[in-house]
Amino acid sequence: MSIATTPTGIGIAEAAARPKRGLGKLVARLLVYGLPTVMILLPLVSFLASSFLGQDNGKPTGGLTFANYAAFFTSSSYLYVFFGTLKLAFTVALISLFFGYILSYLIWRLEGSARYLLLLLSALPLVMNYVVKIYAMRSILGFNGFLNTMLLSLGIIEVPSRLFIFNQTAVMLTMAVIYLPFGILPIFLALERIPQSLISAAADLGAKPGQIFMTVVLPLSLPGSIAAALFVMVIALGDYLTPQMVGGSEGFTFGRAVWSQFGMAFNWPFGAALAVMLLLAVVALIALASLISRTARVR
Amino acid sequence: MVGTPNVIQLVGVTKSYKTVEVLKPVDLDIRDGEFLTVLGPSGSGKTTILRMIGGFTPPSSGRILLRGTDIVHVPIYKRPFNTVFQDYALFPHMTVARNVGYGLRIRKTPQAEIKRRVEAVLETVNLADKAGRYPAELSGGQRQRVALARAIVCEPQVILLDEPLAALDAELRRSMQEFLKDLQRRIRTTFVFITHDQEEAISMSDRIAVMDHGNLVQVGTPQEIYYKPKSEFVAKFFGENNILPASASGSPPLAVIESPLGKHWAPADHQGALLFAIRPESFRLHDGSDLSAGERVAKARLDSVTFLGATTQLSLSVGASDEHRVKIRIPTALSTQNLVAGSDVMLRWSETDVSFLPKG
């Protein structure tokens, strides 16, 4: 060790340590690139590959084919469900954007501890079990549910309505309620990113509260809010459990179509092809969301 | 009150947050067209004063008068003042031209007039070629000038500047100081400027209001503040100063003040223990020539000589048993090179350069 104090000694020690550090770097690289490859990319590639497989009696055959995609694009019913689900998810996103924005804005305008308490409360459903939330919505929307009971007791309707359960509306309402917290949090963050001094500056330059909202708050928070809504749309697109539980036979969605190919028809390659179509839609939405938030950040 | 030379008057204005009084009662007159600097260390209440004038925070008590009319209850967007914020607060989603025109658009000024005035004011701040840029594409100094342009284009009665130069590096800061002072002379608008930088305050202001711990301790021209401080805080806050203990006695009209630099006479409102303050550059070395009226001399022992370039700083001991230290700064000359530590010298100064401060 006494050698290490001389300049040449340090050189020797460094040279000895170099291969070791090289090995450490290699292991780190393997972890950084290897883990995502094994855990994310491989399953994705395998399911992408299986969508090009033919199948016979519930068993994939070895041959490669475009037949699964051809079947999707030529089947009017699958296309109908696909675009119907896009529309449904879009509606859910719009509702989250609208109500999420209003709620976030109101919370954002609060001061002191009430603000974070309310934010916490609005985020609380996120940690609740998903199935429990769906059941809760079912008990509200159901034939003998809270909504019907209330409307009956108010005398608005005379017999319980079947309008709220086991149809597309039920799926839409349930998703809108369950996914609202996913909208509130990012919209609140978008509002929170607006420096207080900008609002002071606008007021200082003569803007009334309404004008401040229209000229400063809304334009600065809208890109982030739209990105949040697109995120909600992505979750709604892939959801098959909510339509399964409150949709009934009318509330058929693309997520259920994918599930039925895997779980009931045992046509995995076709199911994979449908899932790939869903994935493409999701990737397109995420790309759009990131484009919107990036252009907003440049300014 | 019509015709008063004051644009703004603060009358007994205070501010408390819960039980903490951040601003003790303040009376301050801001004159029309002046460059007034509110100066103080951080936490002294200077920004609070600005925020209350601007309407961002209401005072806890007291009145704020705009040409004689109380504006405490006038909302911020109706006050004829504009603020330049410390972080500039430019709207990131608007171009320079739209940022500058914001106040005019809000007031529903005709499009053609907005265009003309924005172009004119961008010319004034030398940013005519940057009209189409976004704030993120500008340098710190350019953003600063956009913020200025945005404030002056509305032709406010007062422009409030909240430490606008704090974020700039030293060189840019100096050129912006000159630019600001020059701009203020050209547009003849009252500037209320907040800073914690003494040099900045002295070089830019017509008058300085010095704040300390929520108190307005002194208001005056830079010369008054520098040479005639009224408290130990002000005397020590600006540059170097010699502060010596003294005591006053005697009966009206004149009190006799005993100090380590000999006897002085002052108005009889000074009594008992007090402090004696004099600037290092107010001293000269006595060359034996005749003293003029009000000039005084005292013997001192030279402890050390520090050559500073154009000036030379001498550290001296004064008092009956050389127990007090005094620093003086004199122009460097051939004769100063012959000064030797340990020798005795005679100091010479004018009584008018001495301030007597309450002790404590």
Image: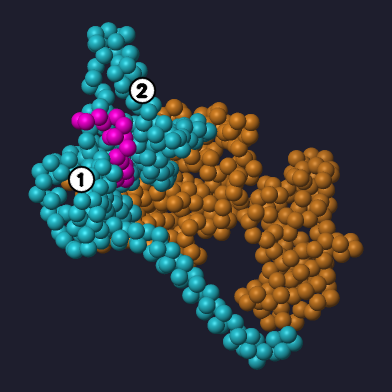
The one nearer the camera, A174 or B241, is: A174
Q: Is residue A270 depicted above or below A14 in this figure?
A: above
Is B204 part of what is drawn in magenta? no
| In this view, A19 is above or below B127 | below
Residue B269 or residue A206, whichever sits in front: A206
Q: Which numbered marker is on residue A139?
A: 2
Residue B101 visible to an observer of this rendering: no
Farthest residue in the bottom direction?
A8
Give amino acid for label 1: Glu
Mark pair 2, 1: CA separation: 62 Å
The quadrant of the rendering that contains the N terminus of chain B is top left
- Label 1 secondary element: helix
The hue of chain B in the figure is orange
In which quarter of the view is residue A77 placed? top left
Q: Is residue A119 left or right of residue B95?
A: right
Q: Which residues are magenta?
A: A229-250
Q: Which residue is mark 1?
A: B113
Query: Which quadrant does the C terminus of chain B fall into?
Result: top right
Q: Nearer the viewer, mark 2 or mark 1?
A: 2
Q: B298 or B37, which is in the foreground?
A: B37
Residue furthest toward the front?
A57
Q: Which chain is cyan?
A: A
Q: Amino acid at mark 2?
A: Ser
Q: Would residue B196 be seen by someone viewing this image from the given angle?
A: yes
Residue A243 magenta-drawn? Answer: yes
